Image (tube, rainbow, N blue to C red):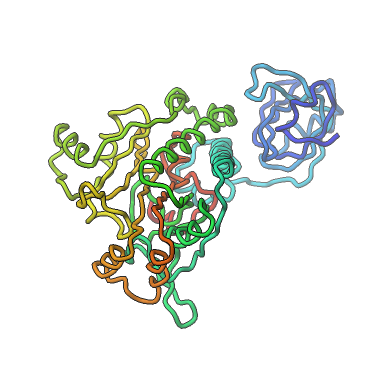
Amino acid sequence: MKTTISTIKNHLDDTVTIGAWLHNKRSSGKIAFLQLRDGTGFIQGVVAKSAVSEDVFDLAKNINQETSLYVTGKVVEDKRSPLGFELQVTDLEVIQEAEDYPITPKEHGTEFLMDHRHLWLRSKKQHAIMKVRNEIIRSTYEFFNDQGFAKVDPPILTGASAEGTTELFHTKYFDEDAYLSQSGQLYLEAAAMALGRVFSFGPTFRAEKSKTRRHLIEFWMIEPEMAFMDHEESLQLQEQYVSHVVQSVLKNCKIELNTLDRDTSKLENIEAPFPRITYDDAIQFLKDQGFDDIDWGDDFGAPHETAIAEAYDKPVFITHFPVEIKAFYMKPDPDNPKVALCADLIAPEGYGEIIGGSQRIDDYELMQQRYDEHDLNGPAYEWYLQLRNYGSVPHSGFGLGLERTVAWITGIEHIRETIPFPRLLNRLYP
């Protein structure tokens, strides 16, 4: 009976066959211990000399790391195993013998491992990170589907910028200028006017040579947009969403979090509501903490965000940033037009901003004024302005950076470990 490691718990005391790779091995006299992986998980296969043929036992002792196999054995309970089971091997069949696998059990530097990322993905740590990443994606779809959202896919090649042209990768679309998308937001606003609640999940690009552990040139972003939703309602949705994702990972990725030595006590209290602090109060807080490098009107850097986050044990919203340092489409606060109805959600433990969001400008004349101020008048932006002319409504949206969220939930140091296949530029700017 063929099965997988993840479902082996359903076959206690049965003899089964799994397709697997040899992750590692050790032997002691008349017994060999094979660490096996099949993509769904890891399990130990125990080969006793007395239980197999001489050829099978010799193979078990001499087989090379990452050789592919069919492994047959009896499923038995083992409470010492993270999985709770092991395989008492009765037969081994080599599919393809691996030779000179470059990533040995010894320590390797990060740059070496990044250069071999196509193989590094096979390690226990990388496997755990990818499984957590997958759970975040799965629970994201679950949350937004349950909330009545429709999935929409905006273009990756665009003619318009959502944030600013200085961070765009330029290319040519036949004889026209085009850019790799830095956000699908503008298109999602159009979709929200048709479908009410929408979200996208896809790659975004930022042409900035940032050399911090927080940044990537290419990353994946979840972007919801909601018609008939104001700023306060959007904040409530954001904290519900993040809480749902964290609790889903805690429930469904216990083995992976243990593999990563993640202190889950720092995640267990991540439930809505989240604390909030206004930009004004955040500036005052930082000055009280001794920061003399920031004034009203400046954006926060990593040290500032970390200091604010350390004052709370949950993600914290920083709200009402100055209009002048935020994107052109953010709606000014009617009670104080110098600040926008916006917020950044800062993750605990120094991982920085994981969500940026705002209520969008829904007034045609105000958006036209913003166009003039930012020199956006032209055919690439005409359709976006037109949305304010045909049944405009209050609407809000936000974007969550997947890789930075994975880094926070898994507790890893380098954000580059969170993406399956980083592009060359992501390696050049660690």
Q: Can residue 340 be seen in this view?
A: yes
Residue 259 horizontal/vertical position (percent): 55, 29
Identify the residue at image location x=36%, y=58%: 362
* Total residue callouts: 0
Q: Quadrant of residue 88?
A: top right
Q: Which residue is drawn at 43% across and 73% down?
A: 178
Snapshot quadrant of residue 139: top right
In this picture, residue 374 sits left or right of residue 146: left
Location of residue 33 in the rendering, given as x and y in whole percent from the top left corner:
70, 26
Up the image or down, 56 lies above or below 150; here it is: above
109 displayed left or right of 87: left
Look at 43% across and 58% down and name the residue there.
Answer: 185
Q: Which residue lies furthest to the top in this view?
A: 79
Does residue 289 appear left or right of residue 242 in this picture? left
Relative to 251, say whether 197 is above or below: below
Q: Can residue 199 be seen in this view?
A: no
Tell me where residue 207 appears, x and y as whole percent: 37, 62
